[in-house]
């Protein structure tokens, strides 16, 4: 009975990233931010937290890939969010950084529909931590300060990475929707427009818009669906901010990702297993 649920013992397939992989730019950017966090006393980060974050993501992803999918990858897909989690998570302890990584990797490998994970691993890990570990975990938005050069560096590299991965339209759609929502909130409440739009000048906003919600694996493939996706996240973000919900962008993305299978279904995606069977049939008919 147990053997039914265990993967076949076949040698793992090894995959290597190409030098043009945009994730290398993300690793460079986030490594710089991680170093900045370690060297800046206001962040309150220390190397043990970085080690816990990186090792939990990379080790869990590698072990689950080898054991369940028989695939051995250079761990870029786990390294990028592990560095982002180290920068974004704010906790005086070490173990929450490992907990975020473990929750993220479990969601990636076990919350799947048609062989593809539904939730953005970084978003899932942060959402779980904020909901269940709220007493000792927060988002470190105030830690970045107001350096315009650091903001422009994160914004420019983030925009370049999303452009290379064909996801810049999501970030633009979300940002424009956020700005419209900020105007609507200031108009309805009579508050300052500058105060309403000020989150857009925060480094965490750029990391969210250009690194978290633009993950190619957990976003629609067609441009029209990507724009709708960004607008939905931005619209729900505006509603949550209107009601005073903290960490509104994290929860908004988590909720919209729950409908990602519907985006994929409407795009007419064909499962990879069917494509391989169709190719094998054609080869058999035309040897």
Image (cartoon, helix red, strand yellow):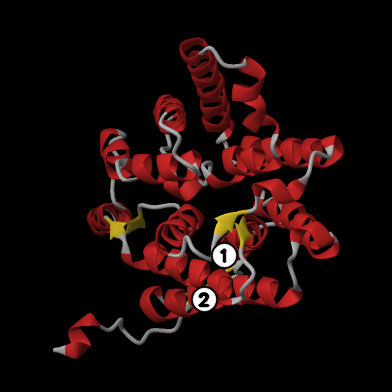
Q: Residue 197 appears in which quarter of the rendering?
A: top right
Which of 134 and 67 lies nearest the eye of the viewer?
A: 134
In the image, residue 185 sits, relative to residue 148, either above or below, namely: above
Q: Residue at x 64, y 23 (%)?
A: 195
Residue 62: mark in rendering: 2
Tell me whether the residue at label 2 lies in contact with that at label 1, contact meaning CB atoms closer than 8 angstroms.
yes
Which of 3 and 282 lies nearest the eye of the viewer?
A: 3
Indicate left or right for 207 with 14 as reference: right
**Could you say where residue 33 lies in the image, as x and y percent from the top left?**
76, 55
Q: Residue at x 54, y 71 (%)?
A: 96
Q: Residues within 10 Å of mark 1 (few under 14, many from 20)?
A: many
**Could you say where residue 56 lies in the image, as x and y percent from the top left?**
55, 75
Indicate left or right for 237 with 28 as reference: left
**Could you say where residue 207 lies in the image, as x and y percent from the top left?**
64, 44
The residue lying furthest to the left in this view is 1
- How much space separates mark 2 and mark 1, taking CA atoms? 9 Å
Which of 136 and 118 lies nearest the eye of the viewer?
A: 136
Q: Secondary structure at mark 2?
A: helix
For the question of whether residue 57 can be seen, the reply is: no
Q: Residues within 10 Å of mark 2 (few under 14, many from 20)?
A: some
Q: Secondary structure at mark 1?
A: helix
Indicate left or right for 47 with 263 as reference: right
The C terminus lies in quadrant: bottom left
Q: Work out whether mark 2 precedes mark 1 in sequence or the reverse, and give the earlier one.
A: 2
Q: Residue at x 25, y 52 (%)?
A: 278
The residue at which mark 1 appears reads as 78
């Amino acid at each position: 009975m147990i053997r039914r649920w265990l993967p076949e013992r076949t040698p793992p397939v090894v995959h290597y990233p190409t030098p043009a992989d945009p994730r290398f730019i993300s690793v460079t950017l986030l490594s710089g931010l991680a170093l900045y966090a370690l060297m800046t006393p206001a962040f309150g980060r220390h190397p043990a937290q970085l080690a816990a974050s990186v090792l939990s993501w990379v080790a869990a992803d590698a072990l689950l890939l080898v054991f369940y999918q028989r695939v051995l990858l250079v761990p870029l897909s786990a390294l990028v969010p592990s560095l982002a989690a180290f920068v974004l998570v704010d906790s005086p302890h070490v173990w929450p950084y490992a907990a975020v990584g473990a929750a993220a990797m479990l969601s990636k490998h076990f919350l799947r529909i048609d062989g593809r994970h539904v939730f953005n691993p970084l978003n899932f890990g942060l959402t779980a931590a904020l909901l269940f570990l709220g007493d000792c975990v927060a988002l470190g938005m105030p830690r970045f300060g107001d350096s315009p050069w650091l903001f422009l560096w994160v914004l420019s590299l983030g925009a370049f990475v999303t452009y290379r991965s064909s996801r810049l339209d999501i970030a633009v759609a979300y940002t424009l929707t956020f700005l419209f929502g900020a105007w609507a909130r200031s108009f309805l409440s009579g508050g300052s427009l500058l105060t309403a739009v000020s989150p857009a000048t925060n480094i965490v906003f750029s990391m969210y818009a250009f690194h978290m919600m633009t993950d190619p694996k957990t976003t629609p493939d067609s441009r029209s669906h990507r724009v709708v996706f960004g607008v939905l996240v931005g619209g729900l973000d505006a509603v949550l901010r209107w009601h005073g919900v903290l960490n509104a962008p994290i929860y908004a993305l988590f909720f919209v990702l729950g409908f990602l299978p519907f985006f994929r279904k409407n795009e007419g995606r064909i499962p990879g297993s069917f494509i391989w069977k169709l190719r094998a049939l054609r080869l058999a008919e035309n040897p």
